[in-house]
Image: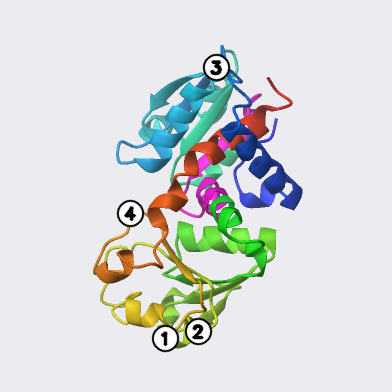
Amino acid sequence: MRSLIRLSNYNKEDVEKIFDIADELQEGKYNDFLKGKTIVMFFPESSIRTRVTFEKGIYLLGGQSIVFPPETLDKKEKAQDVIGYLNNWVDGVIVRYKDIEKLDEMNRYSTFPIINAMTDVNHPCEMLADMYALSKIREDFTIDKFLFVGGIGNIGLAWKEAAELMGFSLTQCSPVKYKMPGVNHIVDLKSAIVGKDIICTDPLGPGMLKDFHNHQVTLEIMNNANDNAILNPCPPFYRGEEVSSEIVESKYFVGYKFKKYLLEIQQAIIIYSMLDYV
């Protein structure tokens, strides 16, 4: 089995295999891969895209999903004991939980794969889906130059993970106090976007909007990027905050069609995690 807690759990060959599986899924392969299997999911009620695609993906593969709120993991019972019982009945666990150390603890005791559906420090499934989407429109997305506009958070850190894994160039643009360690950083957005191909954003958390008032991606700003550049805001995005309304309606915006691949990629992650297990 192959758990996915961090992208660093994978190498490039793993990513290529997941992309191959996603392609094969669209050709009708892996029908009933999860027949007779049960996947437990820990998801908050507010999750929309990730939960919908995981649940539908499990259903389409012939499996059963059982969903609990992530607060279930906060009870007094140790994760070791929760997993000890689940080992009797469960074939995989998908977790959206703030603390990645909880996932590490669960993984130490599980006999099935643990898949990270988002923590406070990363979002590996989202990154794999975005990279797969890029592979459909770019001959080699790893030679593109990426710009992340946002602060230190799970999406920025996830793009850092992805850049380290795949070897592409990543620059962050933000006020100085939001700089991520180990990432090339430029404060001025108009300068930062020059020469970039893929522009990514993240919603602004409480108290950040005032600090980022000069960092909204607008049509005027985007026109300074490379020809054929794209804007890929992390959902949920907010018009008039990290992105302007007009840029969302422009040729640069790829948000909706990018995320359609969440379904196949999250199915592919499950399949890849369980290939030697089922």
Q: Which residue is mark 1?
A: 190
Q: Residues within 10 Å of mark 2 (few under 14, many from 20)?
A: some
**Position of 192 relative to 150 (above/below):** below
Mark 1 residue type: Lys
Disc 4 and disc 3: Cα gap in Å?
36 Å
Q: Tell me which residue sits at (38%, 67%) in the image.
A: 251
Name the mark on residue 103: none
* Marks 4 and 3 in Cβ contact (< 8 Å): no
Name the mark on residue 85: 3
Q: Is disc 3 placed on a helix, strand or loop?
A: helix
* Marks 1 and 2 in Cβ contact (< 8 Å): yes
Q: Is disc 4 placed on a helix, strand or loop?
A: loop
Label located before the other in sequence (1 or 3): 3
Of labels 1 and 3, the one closer to you: 1
Q: Tell me which residue sits at (48%, 36%) in the image.
A: 95
Q: Residues within 10 Å of mark 4 (few under 14, many from 20)?
A: few
Mark 4 residue type: Pro
